[in-house]
Amino acid sequence: MRLVIARCSVDYTGRLAAHLPEATRLIMVKADGCVAIHADGGAYKPLNWMNAPNRLVEQEGSWEVTNPKGERLLITLHEVLSDSSHPMGIDPGLTKDGVEAHLQELLASSPEAIEDGLVLVRREYPTAIGPVDLVCRDADGTVVAVEVKRRGEIDGVEQLTRYVERLSLDSSLGLVRGVFVAQRVKPQARVLAEARGYRCVEVDYDTLRGMAPDDLRLF
């Protein structure tokens, strides 16, 4: 991973136009090519970013990042304060807690609990950015990426987005859609998921274990 701390301004053009005025920020360039620009605050969410695949061209005083969709991120470097690279190796991925891991296992054995006609292709489907919890096909044969969480929060939606984008790069899979599954989906996460075209499904852990008759709730 490459970490650059610099006074910079940023201009994005693509689906819309956005401008970040000059300020000191952290620029991260990950091994897969993802470029993310962070302020000193705001938790994990970058101010702007460009997911892989993309092309980074470094020029004197500026970086230009473009992708096949025609999006462009221009980073103007006014002063570079620090520039370092650190090999991080292969990440083993997130270790789920017992309930979340068991929830994933139960849904893998009964994907129809998520959606009628859903058939499991593979659990922990490998990608270059980590395994997708469940990859299925629906009744129409469309590939469905399923992210399973005990508590459905915004970071889970972001994770699902990265997986859907990654799977969509594989032309053999065709169209890929996403489903976000949790015991409870928080309102903000539901709004974000639905804005990105994902279905949200709330499931009851005890029901899946055969301990209660309650129904799944679809939002």
Image (tube, helix red, strand yellow):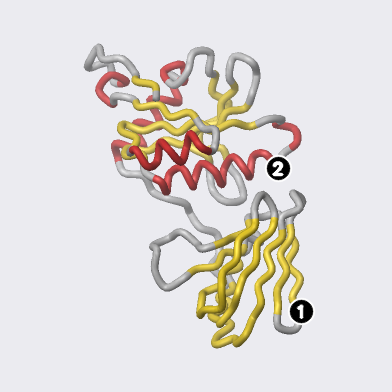
- x 47%, y 18%: residue: 115
Which quadrant is the N terminus positioned in? bottom right
Q: Which mark is residue 169?
A: 2
Asked whether 129 or 47 is in front, the reply is 47
Image coords of residue 182 (percent x, y): 36, 33
Mark found first going from the N terminus, 1 or 2: 1
| Quarter of the view holding residue 49 | bottom right
Q: Which residue is mark 1?
A: 59
Relative height, residue 85 to residue 135 (above, below): below
Asked whether 33 or 109 is in front, the reply is 33
Mark 1 vs mark 2: in front: 1
The amino acid marked with disc number 2 is: Leu
| Quarter of the view holding residue 73 | bottom right
The amino acid marked with disc number 1 is: Gln
Relative height, residue 166 to residue 179 (above, below): below
Image coords of residue 209 (percent x, y): 29, 21
Which quadrant is the C terminus positioned in? top left
